[in-house]
Image: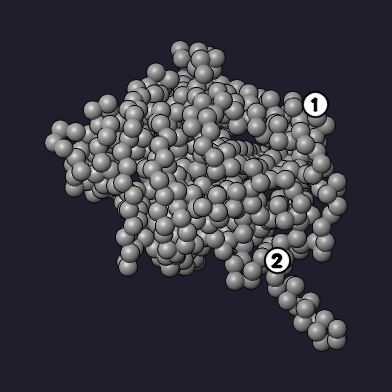
């Protein structure tokens, strides 16, 4: 290679380093030299739902232990809701760049040309696993097993309807869980870590304390009558029973984290495992949040400020307090550098929005990277944070160094800062407007014999058919009573072939034998299969007895599986339509899930 070529290569490397945020090592470390990674993400746990953050209502000794034995971050931000945060964790890029614009109906899917954290670790020789909530796509190739995870056990939607031995997805196969979900997911994470033939990367994505507010008696009994001394920022809006349920659920999480620490210590893997602990957004109710304004769904401090603890004795000095402004987009660059995994293969057209925080982990006095900002968006609300200031899109400016509770608008006192941050926020908003989800169809047939799931939440409804809840994530379909009613899934068939269909259903005895039709309809062809349920399937509502407070999500039911038959379908976009000839007074069925397999 000529000197000129070497010079060009060096210049390109330097430019790419600036984009990525750190200089990636030139080669992989040997597997035995690389640490394991356990990334713990809780669901709807606010900044204040931790004892060491001033909450006197309970104790969280194991979460606090991670902070004491590692580094704790004072200015770490996530998104106002679940799936955008998960996207930013996995890609190191703002979720709008990756096609994620919502939390359901396909808007939660990460674009297929994005490389995930699991892809990075899998390519580096790690065994990879996700236990718990995915919320980034259900059908292949958006399924976790196609996004870098060797092992998946959990659910793919935004929330789940029952937390005690529910229906789950294990590598694409429908299975029944074992016990309370947080305990079950913890068991799987502990078991996965026992194989030490390769380093592991595990994402343990708990669904707690997201509603429905279900928790075993052992923890509920501790809080059912407990005094609530640490109150919400707006105490008159606080539901004390809901608060007690949230405390009980977080206490259970803390116990499970303690089980992990004990198991890893026993196996000899604890001190060679990077343990990251965080939440995906603010609290899901008005409860103690250290005086912060807002909750889940808000771009204010209470909606997006998250705990972040990183424990790793080899790279993190115990008791380190990090002031660096940081966010979910920083986790991929940080963990990759800690594990000596190069990221130079990232496309220059898809630069990271995140930076590596490795240099902050062992030194509380480390100089913060200047001129940094973090952007938040949800429900047409935007906010921008700099090292000391917060600008919300109504023009209010707050000095977070002095006013974390956002009580005093200081825009008039800092006109230059206001203009600069407003210009930057407008640029961010332009990214949002240019990256709107195009309502992509749901994909089927990615691989032969790889089942795809079309849940009720992904269907469009014609006529009187209804979701069982205003929240579609874990709903089933009901009120199917008329011949004009239709259930439609808009899909993209990725390859021509014979497709086998199974359905999870409930129906009354008097509805057995009603003629039902499933039609695959494209712009040029229409193929159908007719069927009828041969046996009734009935289930009471499940979950109400376990709820500690009333819910708005759908209750659960048990559903039977029925083999519909097969249809030959050509590659391309089509509609899958369920319809029936319904005599007056009949109720066809309740539908929870369509399972589709290319043969």
Q: Residue at the spot x=15%, y=33% of the render?
A: 585
Q: Return the x and y of residue 301 as percentages of the image width and height.
A: 48, 44
Q: Residue reaching furthest left?
A: 584
Q: Please give left or right for residue 39 compared with residue 545 in the image.
A: right
Q: Residue at the spot x=83%, y=49% of the render?
A: 31
Q: Would you say residue 516 is visible in this rendering?
A: yes
Q: Return the x and y of residue 113 as percentages of the image width and height.
A: 57, 64
Q: Return the x and y of residue 432 as percentages of the image width and height.
A: 44, 63
Q: Would you say residue 95 is visible in this rendering?
A: no
Neighbor class of circle 2 (other Cα within 10 Å; few <14, some 14-19, many 20+) is few
Q: Return the x and y of residue 38 as percentages of the image width and height.
A: 69, 40
> In the depicted view, which residue is nearer to us: 54 or 276?
276
Secondary structure at numbered mark 1: helix
- Colour convention: one colour
Q: Quadrant of residue 42?
A: top right
Q: Residue at the spot x=63%, y=30% of the render?
A: 186
> In the depicted view, which residue is nearer to us: 298 or 25?
25
Secondary structure at numbered mark 2: loop
Inter-mark Cα distance, 2 to 1: 37 Å
Considering only order in the chain, which callout, 1 or 2, is on the residue closer to the N terminus? 1
CB under 8 Å between discs 2 and 1: no
Q: Please give left or right for residue 364 compared with residue 464 in the image.
A: right
Report the quarter where the N terminus lies. Answer: bottom right
Neighbor class of circle 1 (other Cα within 10 Å; few <14, some 14-19, many 20+) is few
Q: Residue at the spot x=22%, y=46% of the render?
A: 485
> In the depicted view, which residue is nearer to us: 460 or 121?
460
Which label was assigned to residue 266? 1
Query: Considering only vertical position in the picture, is 100 above or below 200?
Result: below
From the image, tell me which residue sits under label 2.
345
Which label was assigned to residue 551? none
Q: Please give left or right for residue 456 compared with residue 14 in the image.
A: left
Query: Considering only vertical position in the picture, is 140 above or below 24?
Result: above
């Amino acid at each position: 290679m000529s000197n000129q070529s070497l010079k060009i290569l060096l210049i390109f490397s330097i430019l790419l380093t600036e984009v990525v945020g750190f200089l990636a090592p030139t080669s992989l470390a040997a597997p035995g030299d690389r640490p394991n990674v356990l990334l713990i993400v809780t669901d709807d746990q606010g900044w204040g739902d931790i004892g060491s953050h001033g909450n006197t209502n309970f104790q969280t000794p194991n979460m606090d232990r991670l902070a004491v034995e590692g580094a704790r971050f004072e200015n770490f931000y996530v998104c106002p809701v679940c799936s955008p945060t998960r996207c930013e964790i996995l890609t190191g890029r703002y979720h709008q760049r990756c096609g994620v614009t919502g939390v359901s109906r396909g808007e939660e899917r990460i674009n297929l040309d994005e490389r995930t954290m699991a892809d990075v670790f899998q390519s580096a020789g790690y065994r990879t696993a996700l236990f718990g909530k995915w919320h980034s796509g259900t059908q292949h190739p958006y399924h976790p097993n196609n996004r870098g995870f060797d092992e998946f056990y959990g659910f793919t939607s935004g929330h789940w309807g029952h937390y005690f031995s529910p229906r789950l997805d294990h590598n694409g196969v429908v299975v029944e869980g074992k016990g309370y979900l947080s305990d079950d997911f913890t068991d799987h994470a502990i078991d996965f870590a026992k194989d030490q033939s390769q380093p592991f990367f595990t994402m343990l994505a708990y669904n707690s304390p997201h509603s429905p507010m279900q928790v075993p008696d052992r923890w509920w009994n501790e809080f059912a009558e407990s005094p609530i001394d640490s109150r919400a920022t707006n105490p008159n809006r606080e539901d004390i029973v809901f608060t007690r349920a949230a405390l009980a659920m977080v206490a259970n999480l803390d116990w499970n984290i303690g089980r992990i620490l004990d198991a890893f210590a026993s196996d000899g893997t604890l001190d060679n495992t990077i343990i990251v602990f965080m939440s995906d957004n603010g609290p899901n109710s008005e409860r103690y949040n250290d005086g912060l304004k807002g909750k889940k769904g808000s771009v204010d401090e209470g909606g997006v400020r998250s705990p972040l603890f990183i424990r790793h004795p080899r790279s993190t000095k115990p008791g380190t307090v990090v002031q660096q402004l940081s966010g979910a987009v920083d986790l991929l660059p940080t963990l990759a550098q800690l594990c000596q995994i190069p990221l130079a293969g990232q496309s220059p057209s898809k630069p990271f929005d995140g930076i590596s925080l490795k240099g902050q982990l062992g030194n509380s006095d480390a100089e913060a990277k200047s001129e940094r900002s973090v952007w938040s968006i949800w429900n047409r609300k935007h906010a921008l944070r700099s090292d000391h200031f917060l600008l919300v899109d109504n023009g209010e400016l707050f000095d977070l160094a002095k006013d974390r509770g956002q009580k005093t608008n200081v825009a008039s006192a800092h006109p230059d800062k206001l203009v600069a941050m407003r210009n930057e926020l407008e640029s961010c908003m332009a990214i949002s407007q240019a990256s709107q989800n195009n309502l992509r169809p749901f994909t089927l047939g990615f691989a032969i014999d790889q089942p795809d799931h079309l849940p009720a939440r992904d269907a469009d409804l014609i006529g009187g058919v209804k979701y069982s809840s205003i929240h579609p994530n874990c709903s089933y379909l009901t009120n199917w009573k008329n011949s004009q009613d239709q259930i439609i899934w808009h899909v993209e068939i990725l390859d021509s072939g014979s497709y086998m269909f199974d359905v999870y259903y409930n129906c009354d005895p008097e509805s057995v034998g009603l003629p039902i039709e499933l039609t695959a309809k494209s712009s040029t062809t229409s193929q159908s299969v007719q069927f009828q349920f041969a046996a009734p399937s009935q289930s009471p509502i499940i979950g109400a007895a376990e709820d500690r407070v009333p819910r708005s999500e759908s209750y659960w039911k048990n559903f039977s599986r029925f083999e519909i038959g097969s249809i030959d379908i050509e590659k391309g976009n089509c509609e899958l339509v369920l319809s029936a000839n319904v005599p007056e007074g009949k109720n066809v069925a309740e539908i929870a899930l369509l399972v589709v397999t290319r043969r």
